[in-house]
Image (cartoon, grey):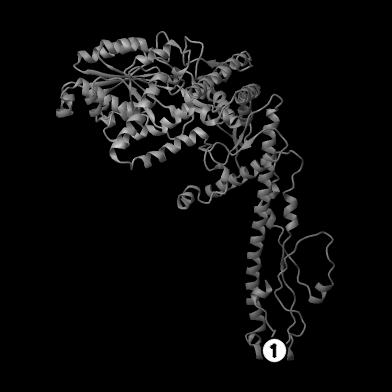
Amino acid sequence: LQLVQNLMHGDDEKQGHRMQYVGEQGHMALLGHSLAAYISVLERERLRKLTTRILSDTTLWLCRLFRYENGSAYYHEDDREGLVKVCRLAINTHYEDYATEGFTLLSSKHPVIYQSAACRPGLGQHLCSQLGLPLSSLCIVPCNTMFGSLHRMDVALLDKLIRDDRESGKLPLLLIANAGTPGAGHTDKFSRLKELCVQYNMWLHVEGVNLATLVLGQVSSTVTAATKCDSMTLTPGPWLGLPAVPAVTLYRHEDPALSLAAGLTSSQPVEKLRALPLWLSLQYLGHDGILQRIKHASQLSQQLLENLKTLASIKTSVGELVFIHLAVEDELNSPVVVFRFSQDNSTRKFPFLGCMCLGEQLAQQVPLSGVDVVELEDEGTCVRFSPLMTAAALGTQENDVAALVEKLGEMIPVLSCTLRFRQDFKDEVLQQASLLYIEDQSWPGLGGVRYEARTTDLDEDKRHHSVEKINSDLLKKLMELDTDLYFSDGPEFCEEKNCIFIGMATEDLDVAELVETIVSIGRDIEESGKLFENMTEVVRRGIQEAEQQLQKANEEKLMEEGVLRQIPLVGSVLNWFSPLQASVKGKTFNLAEGQKLFRRQGAGSDSVSDTSSVSQLEESFRETAPVQASDAEEAEVPQEHHVHIVVETASSDQRVPEGQETESVDALR
């Protein structure tokens, strides 16, 4: 256990954030997995009786809860596995010799599986892959396009597709319908779909979050019609906040042999123990507890929907907040609420901004609400609130929905101002030669800019480094300003680098002043960087010049003094009898003169002094007149505080002690 704990947590010091909160009902579900392992070691007959009881009880409770009469149940970990099994059952039903002949029968009469265009992505492909069917066996049925709901399966078109397939010698096998699409909770017309399936002898399978409302006392007629389907997949784990419980597929079929061949039933007692965690959890919650959780989630949806109706009346200069009653268009209650910020024509060039910003900000500031952002084919980017999938696990309460509405009311004016100022910000940036506007459709704010260095004589690597340094310092300076604006280096997956992004704006923002401030601070950073670089270049060249002068002075010294004076013992004796008279020679350059050249002429000036070039700084090098050592010592110190580097190239007329006749080049440095 200690080893497992170390593998789970590692070096994590935040003990409170290791795993999500698990309530008592969650512990009961987790306990079921441990009990299943212990029960599996019982002697075979006792194990068979116990598993039969657990399986029959759980199946009976689920069928009663979800109004599915005379149904059987298949428990599975992958929520797609139940659909794979019932499709195998449909194949075994339509192809009598399939158990012996196998897939050779399918070539003579090609099976076709029909799926709504609003089904979750990849479901049909997974089904064909598991069954060994070609993708040509999958038929995607569009939603209504001419009349009726835009989000329900087009029944008339489905009828035409089925008739065309039958005429071409194919076998319509199975239809997948939605009781709550993954995107926004749309519900198909099951009564009409069931009639088509009976007419063409097809299997009807239903899945979706709205099936959870079947446990309520008052259920919409659209969802109630799903109880007449041939099979349905339920996911009680997220609906009831139960971790690690299996998904359940309820189905009706009269031939147990075919169900066994399809894998829906098993003679192995251990496989029947999959239902044990759910068996324990259902008993712990009881009928009232289950009903209360589903009812609570539905009430949260209604609470948000009613509040959105009041917020929808708030119209701004650029648009308004509208809610989309998508799940059950002809009913009053909907377990899924989807809304978006509707923009006028002047701001539709930024269609992402309203809903993307709303969703991300609401999810961050009210995390217990469980809202997220979805992309719908017709509406585009929307904000979704689906408490049936999140409320039980997060513990969402009425006050969380109230906080969500309050935060939404605060964000609408800010969002309106940001949309209105976004184009103004772009226009102001484009007028500045030193700024480059960055277009990023995923940024929920005014936009992004990059300060471009005006120096063009640098190579590409140096220029890139200069731009990176300037924008990094500029971002730090902007973040230190006393303002309500938010400055950032951009979205996580932004393609543009070395950028500065500005967040959302308020009504009192002066866009022109903001852009001018960015330009001014960037210019100051660029000029200070140039001053430092030029000063560094002056010092470097001065040192090189000094080294050359040292080398030249040593050569002249050798020529003037002769070789004998360079020998330590001989040179000291020769210097004693015949001291060498030499003058002090050297070079000097002034760093302060270079600083004066980079001083700006006036605050806010856009011009840069032409005297700041390296060539003119080099003119400050001047050759000092040769003076005697005694005169140099008595020379008056200049009043101006200059920094001088003097290179001494000859010794004074004083006698040199023995052993110290010459100095090395390093000592002179």
| Residue name at image x 60 percent, y 26 percent | 400
Percent coordinates x, y for residue 230 in the rendering: 31, 18
Percent coordinates x, y for residue 508 in the rendering: 72, 25
- Asked if 62 appears above or below 623 in the picture, the reply is above
- Asked if 195 appears above or below 392 in the picture, the reply is above
- Asked if 509 appears above or below 487 in the picture, the reply is above
Disc 1, SS: helix
The answer to whether any part of residue 461 appears in the image is: yes
366 or 311, which is in the foreground?
366
User: What amino acid does circle 1 point to?
Assistant: Ser
Q: Residue most toward the top? A: 147
Dot 1, how many residues are within 10 Å of its Cα: few (below 14), some (14-19), or many (20+)?
A: many
The answer to whether any part of residue 343 appears in the image is: no
Percent coordinates x, y for residue 16 in the rendering: 57, 43
Question: In the rendered image, which quarter is residue 487 located in?
Answer: top right
619 or 354, which is in the foreground?
354
Percent coordinates x, y for residue 547 in the rendering: 63, 69
232 or 419, which is in the foreground?
232
Residue pointed to by mark 1: 572
- Asked if 496 appears above or below 189 in the picture, the reply is below
Question: In the rendered image, which quarter is residue 557 located in?
Answer: bottom right
